[in-house]
Every structure is written in structure tokens, then in C-alpha cells.
């Protein structure tokens, strides 16, 4: 068992939310069922494309993409799609309702936009609605996007780890990726390809949650299941070759690839309603639901395939972690990073 410390080093240069503290609501200790917040969760209804060329693998009751062995560790089934739609809602709430933080429409509206690893495509669909004159392209290993989409939104099956083959006249004004932790073995290569496929002056934005649950007080030690799990998941994902806990590294990767004016925001998002404040409570409630849905898909493949735990052992860990996440006495949260930068105007095209 790895006993690594949280992979979330203090970053003194963060632009905002630097010393964000989450105030504890002392009344939330015993009952955390939060029926008042349940109504704020939108139901999701994903219509998936089907095709005879789809190849899926079924394992431990979940459906996985089977493009290439060991390509991606999370399932792509309906339950996972529902989780992604919930996560979309969380990212929007954190960003104050917006889909992006980069000033993409400051000079002139973007014409061509790429969403890498688009998942259920919600981000791409909503951005296509916001910029009806732009073409928005979403790519993913899995064709799990809906078929009824705005006419300026297109989805393609594509592996972003392979060589990007866009022609120079197809360069983008904006490239976006969200929640892509665990997707790529070589992140600097991903950033180099994105940089190359942007127009000079074009923007890139990455939105990513840490894969590390933490607390700022003594309740960290009481969250034994969660703490051990984070450490083990980090170890397992490194062994798999696609690290999960990379959110705090995007800024450096973006700068190394040559991006200018790189900025980063980090937001602490509580798990549960233990914080003060209506907005944080609502966000914490939804976040905890999403986290509870995430534990099994994140853990199953890494624990059984990579770490060779038995199914029973894995299930015990999953239940222990969920118990910690539901415990209102624990002041747990996850850091969400928004990082954006611009390809310099003078950059060769
Ligand atoms: C956690 S989901 C995030 C989806 C979406 N960006 C969102 O925020 O809802 C990660 C997505 O990346 C896709 N993915 C994983 N590896 C990929 C690769 N090499 N190329 C393209 N997509 C990939 C997965 O199929 C999955 O849909």
C-alpha cells in the first residue's frame, strides 16, 4: 500500500480563491439526508447512438469501451453517463454558471471550437447554442453523445492520444478539455498537439478536479477509508500508466507547451452540506451524490485489474469509502482547477 502524501502542493501563484476557507455549519452533524437539496438535481436521460461497429467489454457489471486493451479505466455505460451529466452541472455551478473562464469572445466570437474527450457532449452542445455561428466539434473514444444536437455541433470518435490530423485551415480558436484525468499517458504531448492545432491568439482551457479528497482540519485523520483510497488510487493509476491526480499539473504543462497569459483558478468544493452558505451547501449536496456515483467506476478496474484485489475486497473498500463520504462529521472537499492560456499572436502557424 502506498503511503503518499496528497499530490496537491501549495501553489502560491494561484490567481484567485487562493486562501478560500470553507466555514463549517455546526448544525450539520447528525442528519445529512438533505431532502431540501434533492429537488435541485436535474434528471438526465441520455440517448446513445448505437452501431454494429461498437465494441464493448463487460466486467463486474459495468460496460467499458474496448477500443484498445487498457485504454481507459472508466466505464461508458448509462450510469457513468448520468454521473458525467451531474459533473457538468457541478463545473457550471463552480464557474458561476458559465461554460468557460477564458476570454474567448473578447475580441471576436470564436469560429471553430474543439472539445476533447467530450463524454456525453453536454458542454459542446451548450457551447454550440451559445455560439450559433461557430462550429463546435466534440471528440471521444466512445460514441455516447446524443443524436439530437444543434446543427453547428458535431461529434467524432477519435483517440486524442494518437496524432491529430486536422489540416492547417481547420485550426481552432478554442480547445477545451474537462475531467480528462486518467485519459492520457503523455500529457506534454497532448498540450503540444493542442498548441499546434490552435490559431495564433486562440485559447485553450482545461477544467479538472483533483483525484484527492482532503480536509483542512483534524477530520482528515478520521476519514481513514477515503485517505487510504486516494493514496491507493494514485499508486494504481501510475502503475496503469495514466495518472488520475493531475489537476494541479495543468498549469505547468500549458506553460511548457508555449502558451502565454496562463491563468489558474482553484475552487474547494465540499462533499456534503457541512459548510455554511446556501450555494456551497447546494453544491456540496450535488457533489456528494456525484462522488458516491464515482467511487465504484473509479475503483473497480484499477483495484481488480491493476492491483489484483479480489472483487469482494474491492467491494469492501468501495463501501468504506462511501461511508466516509456520507459522514457529515467529516469536512471533506476536492479541489477543482480551471486553467486557461493563449497561443501567442506572433506564434508561427
Ligand atoms: C470523465 S469523462 C469526461 C467527459 C466530458 N469531458 C465531461 O466533462 O463531461 C472522460 C472522457 O474522455 C474520454 N477519453 C478517454 N481517453 C480518451 C482519448 N485517448 N481520446 C479521446 N477521448 C478519451 C472517455 O471516453 C470519457 O468520455
Image (cartoon, rainbow, N blue to C red):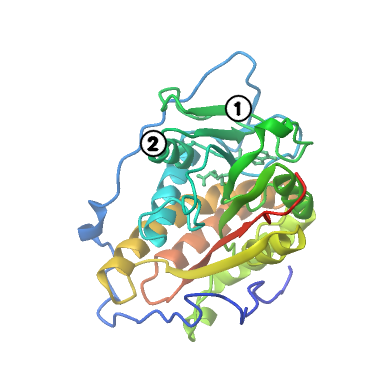
Q: Are marks 2 and 1 in contact (CB under 8 Å)?
A: no
Q: Nearer the viewer, residue 166 or 321?
A: 166
Q: Give the percent coordinates (x, y) of residue 76.
A: 56, 36
Please report the residue visible at 67 percent of the width from the left and 51 percent of the height from the top.
Answer: 182
Depicted 262 relative to depicted 163: above or below? below
Q: Which residue is mark 1?
A: 156
Depicted 46 relative to depicted 224: above or below? above
Q: CA distance from mark 2 to mark 1?
A: 18 Å
Disc 2 crowd, CA 10 A, few/some/many (<14, 14-19, 20+): some
In front of the other: label 2 or label 1? 2
Left or right side of 234 for 62: left
Quadrant position of residue 112? top right
Quarter of the image for the N terminus: give it: bottom right
Left or right side of 100 for 281: left
Q: Which mark is residue 129?
A: 2
* Residue 143 visible in this rendered orientation of the protein: no
Left or right side of 198 for 78: left
Note whether ligand 1 is within 8 Å of mark 1. Answer: no
Depicted 198 relative to depicted 234: above or below? above
Please report the residue visible at 46 percent of the width from the left and 68 percent of the height from the top.
Answer: 324
* Residue 175 visible in this rendered orientation of the protein: yes
Amino acid at each position: 500500500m502506498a503511503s503518499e502524501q496528497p499530490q496537491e502542493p501549495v501553489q502560491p501563484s494561484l490567481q484567485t480563491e487562493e486562501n478560500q476557507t470553507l466555514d463549517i455549519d455546526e448544525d450539520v452533524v447528525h442528519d445529512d439526508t438533505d431532502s431540501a437539496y434533492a429537488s435541485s438535481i436535474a434528471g438526465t436521460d441520455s440517448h446513445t447512438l448505437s452501431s454494429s461497429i461498437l465494441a464493448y467489454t463487460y466486467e463486474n457489471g459495468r460496460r467499458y469501451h474496448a477500443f484498445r486493451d487498457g485504454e481507459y479505466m472508466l466505464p461508458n455505460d448509462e450510469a457513468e453517463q448520468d454521473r458525467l451529466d451531474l459533473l457538468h452541472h457541478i463545473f457550471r455551478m463552480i464557474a458561476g454558471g458559465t461554460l468557460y473562464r477564458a476570454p474567448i469572445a473578447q475580441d471576436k466570437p470564436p469560429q471553430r471550437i474543439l472539445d476533447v474527450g467530450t463524454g456525453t457532449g453536454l458542454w459542446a452542445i451548450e457551447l454550440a447554442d451559445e455560439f450559433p455561428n461557430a462550429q463546435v466539434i466534440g471528440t471521444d473514444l466512445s460514441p455516447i453523445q446524443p443524436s439530437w444536437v444543434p446543427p453547428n455541433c458535431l461529434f467524432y470518435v477519435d483517440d486524442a492520444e494518437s496524432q491529430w490530423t486536422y489540416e492547417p485551415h481547420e485550426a481552432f480558436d478554442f480547445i477545451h478539455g474537462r475531467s480528462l484525468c486518467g485519459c492520457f499517458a503523455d500529457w506534454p504531448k497532448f498540450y503540444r498537439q493542442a498548441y499546434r492545432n490552435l490559431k495564433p491568439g486562440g485559447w485553450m482551457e482545461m477544467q479538472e478536479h483533483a483525484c484527492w479528497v482532503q480536509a483542512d482540519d483534524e477530520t482528515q485523520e478520521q476519514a481513514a477509508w477515503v485517505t487510504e483510497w486516494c493514496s491507493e488510487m494514485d499508486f494504481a493509476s501510475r502503475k496503469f500508466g495514466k495518472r488520475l491526480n493531475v489537476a494541479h499539473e495543468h498549469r505547468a504543462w500549458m506553460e511548457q507547451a508555449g502558451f502565454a497569459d496562463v491563468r489558474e483558478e482553484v475552487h474547494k468544493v465540499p462533499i456534503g452540506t457541512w459548510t455554511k452558505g446556501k450555494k456551497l451547501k447546494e453544491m456540496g449536496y450535488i457533489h456528494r451524490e456525484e462522488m458516491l456515483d464515482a467511487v465504484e467506476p473509479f475503483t473497480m478496474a484499477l483495484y481488480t485489474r491493476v492491483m489484483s484485489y479480489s472483487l469482494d475486497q474491492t467491494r469492501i473498500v468501495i463501501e468504506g469509502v462511501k461511508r466516509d463520504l456520507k459522514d457529515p462529521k467529516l469536512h471533506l472537499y476536492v479541489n477543482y482547477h480551471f486553467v486557461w492560456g493563449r497561443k501567442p499572436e506572433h506564434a508561427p502557424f
